[in-house]
């Protein structure tokens, strides 16, 4: 019996009406379509089988997200609070009867320079390291384990000594602070532990490194670290900090959260001029700088957010593009030059005022520039630039047709390597935060604080923890990496940090060209480095197989008094 027609589509060409047809059993049999246009009415009937074929064809050939982007969308990025800071994924309390046995962590590093030296964990301008941090023999520290991963991506031609000095000083500071971090972690004071690492570790090292860089005319570097504390009871908490675009992640290979396959939690924040959340953090920081200057009687009205240009288009040494006013680049000799074309400004800063007084800025992506850049770039350079050119692994675009032809970017402003404008055409660093980019930091009023995230590794989870330079992260997506490492770890002999670090570099070599030299392989695109930790899943302590007083384990206060009375589900995390 036919249902009443339902009009679904109307357009200047006419309209269609769909009538769903049912058999007596009430099951859908097909769809009757009436299409009205200037030429008259056309009526067509599609059976259920035909509809299935049409839907399947649309899935395979219609406009859809590219397969690599679908894979990348599985990565869980940090959830942010109202201040745009990462939310820590650590349980609010541990059970007093929850005791686990853990095996020692396995660490490893690997890398390859684009050119130049490779020594002591330095690959070109990259520096990388791992360490098991020794603890003093205090009674309350018995049974703790602490390990550390580090990756820094120097830039500007003289960034290697900056990255290497920071590595040595950070390891020294983390070793000094490790006992305090252990005690605070056991007490559940994760935020206080992070505050200690920021103020007594990170800030101190930044001052020392920047003083050395200024004295020796070194250039800047990114910095990403992951410090993991394993408690005597077996709980494991990883603290990630980063300045810049060197990524960090915890890859779950087993456990309840990885029941459907390897799951990736990215624990570093995006510090690029294209990330809207980071731009909100940036303008808030600029406002703080302005207010501090005003409060001490210094000039402050000149302090405001800096303009950001799409990619390096029409900047010195960058690619060229028709600008928003239609000015075209030209050719001098055999080289394209911007000529009259100007950099395309990416963000609008909208003043927030109360009673006529400036109280801050909101950030808005310029809608005209957003649409202009990718379409003008496509016209000039071809379909390959759709979705951006900075990081092939991070490209997100819609495709269509059986061949998957690029159709348009999912986010037009992403993945261009956008930079701040320091002058009419002079561009700055692609990262909104970095170590020892002293001149740019002063010109742009950028923050030198790290972003922090605490992440608890559940007892049933075997994990791979990675920090790496963007020479690796731009070319191999995190989910792709997770699936590759998960496959490798089916062989227990591969469940070692050094083996997995080599496996990551092997995966990279399948993506980009490498050349062989007397000193080893060199990457054709960038310096590359990675630090890895492998941890197997924990097992129940033999004396505490059951979470009850009858097991013979006495309750131990672990920070939250309530936790000594009420066991907490091991899957519970702080939302």
Image (spheres, rainbow, N blue to C red):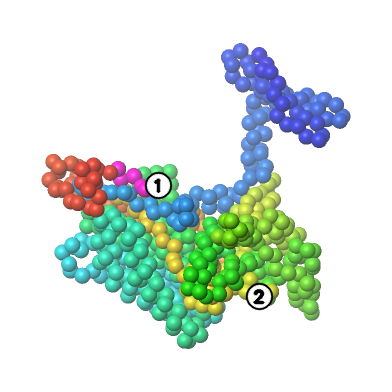
Q: Looking at the picture, how far across and down is residue 14, in whole percent? A: 80, 31
What's the residue at 21%, 43% (across, down)? 565
Q: Looking at the picture, how far across and down is residue 113, in whole percent? A: 50, 75
Question: How many neighbours does mark 1 have within 10 angstroms: few (below 14), some (14-19), or many (20 or more)?
Answer: few
120 and 227: which is toward the camera: 227
Circle on res. 498: none
What's the residue at 65%, 66% (across, down)? 309
Residue 301 in magenta stretch: no
485 and 299: which is toward the camera: 299
Q: Looking at the picture, how far across and down is residue 435, in whole percent? A: 47, 74
- Left or right for 91, reference 32: left
Q: Looking at the picture, how far across and down is residue 513, in whole percent? A: 57, 69
Name the secondary structure under disc 1.
loop
Residue 571 in magenta stretch: yes
Question: Which stretch did the figure color magenta?
Answer: 569-575
The residue furthest bottom is 216
Q: Name the residue under label 2.
A: 423
Residue mark closest to the camera, 2 vs 1: 2
Q: Image quadrant for the N terminus?
A: top right
Specify which label sits upstream in the sequence, 2 or 1: 2
- Left or right for 76, reference 403: left
Chief secondary structure of the magenta portion: loop
Alpha-carbon span between mark 2 and mark 1? 43 Å
What's the residue at 54%, 71% (across, down)? 445
Question: How many neighbours does mark 2 have within 10 angstroms: few (below 14), some (14-19), or many (20 or more)?
Answer: few
- Left or right for 26, reference 373: left
From this view, report whether residue 172 is shown above or below residue 86: below
Q: Mark 1 points at which residue?
A: 575
CB within 8 Å, label 2 to label 1: no
From this view, report whether residue 348 is shown above or below residue 12: below
């Amino acid at each position: 019996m036919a249902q009443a027609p339902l009009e679904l589509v109307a357009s200047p060409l006419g309209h269609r009406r769909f009538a769903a047809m049912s058999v007596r059993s009430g099951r859908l049999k097909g769809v009757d379509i009436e299409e009205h246009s200037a030429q008259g009415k056309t009526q067509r009937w599609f059976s259920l089988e035909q509809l299935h074929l049409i839907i399947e064809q649309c899935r395979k050939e219609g406009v859809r997200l590219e397969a690599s982007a679908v894979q990348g969308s599985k990565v869980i990025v940090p959830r942010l609070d109202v201040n745009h800071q990462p939310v820590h994924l650590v349980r609010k309390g541990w059970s007093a009867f929850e005791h686990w046995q853990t095996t020692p962590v396995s660490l490893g590093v690997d890398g390859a320079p684009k050119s130049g030296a490779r020594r002591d964990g330095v690959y070109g301008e990259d520096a990388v390291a791992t360490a098991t941090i020794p603890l003093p023999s205090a009674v309350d520290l018995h049974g703790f384990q602490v390990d550390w991963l580090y990756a820094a991506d120097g830039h500007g031609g003289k960034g290697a000594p900056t990255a290497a000095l920071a590595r040595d000083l950070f390891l020294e500071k983390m070793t000094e602070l490790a006992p305090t971090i252990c005690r605070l972690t056991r007490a559940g004071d994760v935020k206080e532990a992070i505050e200690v690492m920021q103020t007594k570790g990170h800030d101190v090292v930044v001052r020392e490194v920047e003083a050395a860089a200024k004295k020796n005319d070194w250039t800047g570097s990114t910095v990403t670290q992951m410090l993991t504390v394993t408690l005597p009871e077996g709980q494991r908490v990883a603290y990630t900090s980063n300045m810049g675009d060197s990524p960090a992640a915890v890859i779950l290979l087993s456990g309840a959260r990885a029941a459907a396959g390897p799951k990736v939690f990215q624990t570093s924040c995006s510090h690029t001029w294209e990330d809207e959340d980071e731009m909100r953090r940036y303008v808030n920081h600029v406002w703080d700088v302005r207010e501090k200057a005003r409060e001490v009687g210094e000039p402050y009205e000149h302090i405001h957010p800096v303009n950001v240009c799409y990619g390096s288009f029409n900047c010195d040494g960058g690619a060229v593009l028709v600008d928003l006013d239609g000015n075209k680049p030209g050719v001098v000799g055999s080289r394209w030059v911007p000529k009259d074309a100007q950099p395309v400004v990416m963000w609008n800063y909208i003043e927030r005022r109360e009673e006529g007084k400036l109280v801050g800025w909101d950030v808005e992506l310029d809608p005209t520039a957003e649409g202009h850049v990718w379409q003008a770039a496509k016209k000039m350079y071809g379909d390959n630039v759709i979705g951006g050119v900075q990081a092939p692994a991070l490209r997100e675009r819609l495709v269509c047709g059986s061949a998957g032809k690029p159709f348009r970017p999912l986010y037009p402003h992403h993945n261009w390597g956008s930079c701040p404008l320091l002058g009419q055409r002079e561009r700055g660093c692609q990262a909104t935060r970095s170590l020892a980019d002293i001149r740019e930091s002063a010109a742009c009023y950028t923050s030198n604080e790290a972003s922090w995230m605490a992440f608890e590794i559940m007892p049933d989870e075997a994990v791979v923890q990675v920090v790496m330079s963007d020479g690796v992260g731009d070319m191999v997506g995190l989910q792709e990496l997770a699936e590759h490492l998960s496959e490798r770890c089916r062989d227990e002999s591969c469940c070692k940090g050094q083996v997995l670090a080599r496996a990551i570099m092997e995966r990279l070599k399948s993506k980009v060209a490498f050349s062989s030299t007397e000193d080893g392989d060199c990457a054709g695109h960038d310096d590359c480095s990675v630090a890895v930790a492998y941890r197997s899943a924990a097992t129940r302590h033999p004396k505490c197989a059951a979470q009850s007083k009858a097991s013979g384990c006495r309750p131990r206060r672990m920070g939250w008094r309530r936790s000594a009375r009420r066991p907490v589900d091991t899957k519970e995390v702080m939302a």
